[in-house]
Amino acid sequence: MLTLSMPYAAAPAAAQAAPSGGAIDSIGTPMLWAATLGAVLALFALDFLLTRKPHAVSMPEAVSWSVFYIALPLLFGGWVWAQHGSQTGMEYFTGYLVEKSLSVDNLFIFMLLLAGFAVPKELQQRVLLIGVAGALVLRGIFIALGAQLIASFDWAFLLFGIILLVTAVKVARDAMTDADHQPVAEMPVVRLINRVWPVAQEYHGTRMTVRSAGRRALTPLAVVTLAVLGTDIIFAIDSVPAVYGITGDPYLVFATNAFALLGLRALYFVLEGALSRLVHLGHGLAIILGFIAVKLILHWAHGVWPGVTTVPTLWSLVFIVAVLAVVTVTSLRATRDRSTGCTGAHDHAVEHDAQRY
């Protein structure tokens, strides 16, 4: 059972996550949870209304929405800092930075799927929005499970740490390999769909099914949407343990995930070209995930052997910002002689990330 309380003292986040008695301290009062969930649902409803009529997203439109979805979590973080103290504020901003970094990594996979299925420009934002909604639902389930594990079992920190360590090794190996990515048609979720249900050859607007040869068939839009939802499961397994390595507060875990995902649709169209230059992002994410894995394992070890040191949240924030800054600079230097629209770097980066799926 989760104990809802006022802000905790300025101690390491993980230590606050599992106080004696197996309860979890959280700033998430019932009213705050209701307001947050209501705001998230309202924003999704607004997005669905905006995408009801298919249209190609212009750069001014994408930039405007991206600015809004970045300003919103920053303002909310300022409120958290003012109301609940600097320690909680740092946990929120660090968790949000980690989740936003992982969401940018996810965009590589969305690019792969949208390109592989040749999704028309006017339908791309509908696919992205459904994928984001599915990701948020799945992460909500994982967050609830993670909170119960942490409340009941100290070894949950060790389990999360091992999951992230394995993920970090996999991401690092994929970032360093030159192997070709798996063709979209050979992805397990796509092969399964084609085996159990006929698929139409052409898109039919926003329709998910059509009548074909006397049978009900899925449209390519339905297939790519299911493929995106399938990858959401992997994203949840990666991201939820990562943010639990920053804070044990399930409300902050949910808020950082929600804010990172809400602006993903607009961010995709803003960064569609720029992402091709972030060729070292995979290396940076591997380092960040490995760092958080070690942080979680150290916290578990500290509970068993009190002499083991732990990593303060401030150090985590500084380390993550430094890693992201370094990989951004090195990526831009590595691609400075290429034109922004060059597909080589983009294909290379997508191939690396696609190995994870």
Image (tube, grey):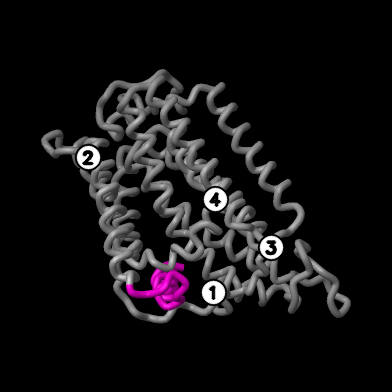
Q: Residue 343 colored magenta? A: yes
Q: Nearer the viewer, mark 3 or mark 4?
A: 4
Q: Please report contact status of discs 1 and 2: CB closer than 8 Å, yes or no.
A: no
The residue nearer to you, when weighing 91 against 157, is 91
What residue is at 61 percent from the left and 49 percent from the top?
A: 133
Q: Nearer the viewer, mark 3 or mark 1?
A: 3
First in residue order: circle 2 vs circle 4:
4
Q: Nearer the viewer, mark 2 or mark 4?
A: 4
First in residue order: circle 3 vs circle 2:
3
Residue holding disc 4: 63
What residue is at 42 percent from the left and 74 percent from the top?
A: 351
Residue holding disc 2: 315
First in residue order: circle 1 vs circle 4:
4
Q: Which residues are magenta?
A: 337-357
Can you tell which mark lies on residue 187?
1
Dot 4, crowdedness within 10 Å: few (<14), some or many (≥20)?
Answer: some
Q: Nearer the viewer, mark 1 or mark 4?
A: 4
Give the image quarter of residue 196.
Answer: bottom right
Q: Please report contact status of discs 3 and 4: CB closer than 8 Å, yes or no.
A: no
Position above or below: 243 against 248: below
What distance separates the C-alpha of mark 1 from that of mark 4? Answer: 32 Å
What distance separates the C-alpha of mark 2 from that of mark 4? Answer: 32 Å
Give the image quarter of residue 334.
Answer: bottom left
Tell whether 207 sits left or right of 355.
right
Tell whether 25 sits left or right of 50.
left
What distance separates the C-alpha of mark 3 from that of mark 4? Answer: 18 Å
Residue holding disc 3: 123
Dot 3, crowdedness within 10 Å: few (<14), some or many (≥20)?
Answer: many
Q: Find numbered disc 1 in the image and state the secondary structure of the residue it sits on.
A: loop
Position in image of residue 231 (x %, y %): 52, 61
